[in-house]
Image (spheres, rainbow, N blue to C red):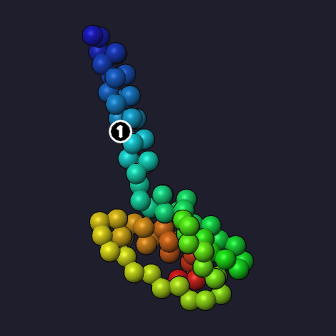
Amino acid sequence: MSEIQLRHLRYSAVDIFKTALRSVDAQELTRRAIEVSATRIRIANVELNANKPIYVVAVGKAAASMSMALNETLRTRV
C-alpha cells in the first residue's frame, strides 16, 4: 500500500469516527428534540406551556451537555 493510499485511509477513518461521535452528541440530540413556539414548548413527546416556569433537573453522564442545550434553546424560560 502506498503512502498516499495509507494517508487517505487515515483521513477516511478519522472522518468516520467524527461522524459517529456527532451522531451520539447529547447536546446536539437535545437541541433537535426541542421545538419552541410562542405558547408551547415541546421536548421529545412532552408538551409544556411556555407561559409557566420550567425547572430542570439533570443527572448522569450526559446531564451537563443536555442541560446546556436546553438552556441555550430556551434561554430565559428556564
Q: Is residue 74 above or below residue 18?
A: below
Check disc 1: other Cα within 10 Å, few if <14, some if 14-19, many if 20+. Answer: few
Q: Name the quadrant of the N terminus.
A: top left
55 horizontally vs 73: left or right: left
19 horizontally vs 6: left or right: right
What residue appears at the point 34 percent right and 31 percent down from the top-left corner? 13
Name the residue at the top extreme.
Answer: 1
What residue appears at the point 34 percent right and 65 percent down from the top-left corner? 62
Local secondary structure at mark 1: helix
27 horizontally vs 10: left or right: right
**Residue corresponding to mark 1:** 17
Q: Is residue 44 above or below residue 78?
A: above
Residue 32, x across and y down, in percent: 55, 59
Residue 19, x across and y down, in percent: 42, 41
Q: Is residue 34 above or below residue 50?
A: above
Q: Nearer the viewer, residue 15 or 2?
A: 15
In which quadrant of the rendered view does residue 3 lie?
Answer: top left
What residue appears at the point 60 percent right and 79 percent down from the top-left corner? 48
What residue appears at the point 65 percent right and 87 percent down from the top-left corner? 51
Q: Nearer the viewer, residue 57 or 10?
A: 57
Q: Nearer the viewer, residue 50 or 78?
A: 50
Residue 73 visible somewhere in the drawing: no
Residue 75, x across and y down, in percent: 56, 78
